[in-house]
Amino acid sequence: MLGKTAGGLFWMFRYLERSENTARLVEAGFRIALTRPDGADDEWASVLQTAAVAGAYQARHGEVEAARAIDFLLRDTTNSSSVLSAIASARQNARLVRTALTREVWEAVNDTYMILKETLARPVRPRDLPEVLATIRQQSALVRGALHGTMLRNDIFDFCRLGTFLERADNTARILDVKYYVLLPSISQIGSSLDNVQWETILRSVAGQRAYRWITQGESSPMGIADFLIFDGRMPRSLRFSVSKIATNLAYLETGYGTRLPSRDQIDVLKARLDTMTIERVFEDGLHEFIIDFLADIARLGQQIEKDYRFLG
């Protein structure tokens, strides 16, 4: 496959995943702001930081206000990570690699762009926000369904999945670092009376609140939530699950192309680290430090994949 095509597939699905992740962050921020009207602006500042756009927002708007933050995250085309910008970038990449996609996948992406362009044509009123966010999630699910239901399991599929899980791993790690580490800055605070709504927000951001309840039978703790989102391989947005899927798809590419490339070695090291680490060790060494190292590893891996498969031609 041409490197340019591989890169288009990879980034198409990174942007699709980013659009859904941003919508989930907005939903989590909106829900917790409703419970804490006095601290709503602080919560939106945290959401902007999690989305890695706090600096861009400040340069454009200055002080954080809920309405402006929501608009910046959903609609502002000067924000390259807004839902509207991400969907437009996904569609542009899909157009570039259209011949590599089934008709169903292309139509799902194009329909998603058209629907969200209309849905986000004007500022979203607070009362309409839940419905708008649900639409974003549903459209993302439709694209994934078309991919899984119609695409051959070949190198095209592998590059799509690599984009999805690299973006997902990065997003979950950022949520943990910003939401969890800010609330629980030292191990000495474990077990203190922190607001359960905040922990619920972390889980809701990654669609994991019900799964976590099933596993823990309703019991929740800071360390338990961190363990779930980092190490539970059954949780489709956990770091271990995402890294495992990246490793699997890179292994398929190695088999298909008959060549072992440096990105495969990198993911094997990262996977082995997660397989041998425990949540107790993470807390002992520092959760923030663990997450920062993980984010750096994921960023290097993404760059290495681009280099190995010559995305720039």
Image: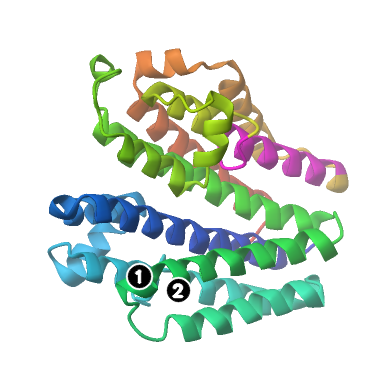
- Disc 2 + disc 1, Cβ < 8 Å: yes
Provide the major secondary structure of the magenta segment.
helix
| Residue 94 in which image quadrant | bottom right
Examine the structure image and report whether residue 245 is included in the region drawn in magenta.
yes
Query: In which image quadrant can residue 112 be found?
Result: bottom right
Seen in the picture, residue 236 relative to 69 is either above or below; the reply is: above
Q: Which mark is residue 85?
A: 2
From the image, which quarter does the C terminus lie in?
bottom right
Q: Is residue 28 above or below residue 147?
A: above
Q: Position of residue 133 (x, y in %)?
A: 46, 66
In this view, the residue in front, 41 or 280, is 41
Q: Secondary structure at mark 2?
A: helix
Residue type at numbered disc 2? Ser
Between the residue at mark 2 and the residue at mark 1, the CA separation in whole angstroms equals 7 Å
* Total labels drawn: 2
Asked whether 98 or 146 is in front, the reply is 146
- Please give the name of the residue rendered at 78% of the width and 71% of the height, measured from the top-left corner: 101
Magenta-highlighted residues? 235-255
Which image quarter is the N terminus in? Answer: bottom right
Q: Position of residue 191 (x, y in %)?
A: 30, 18
Q: Which residue is mark 1?
A: 79
The local secondary structure at tag 1 comes to loop
Residue positioned most to the front: 218
Whether residue 49 appears in magenta in the rendering, the answer is no
Q: Amino acid at mark 1?
A: Asn
The answer to whether residue 112 is visible is yes
Residue positioned 69% across, 58% down in the render: 160
Q: Pick whichever, 297 or 246, lies toward us.
A: 246
Mark 1: give few (<14), some (14-19) or many (20+) Cα within 10 Å: some
Measured from the top left, where is residue 259 in percent x and y? 81, 41
Left or right, 290 with respect to 135, comes to left
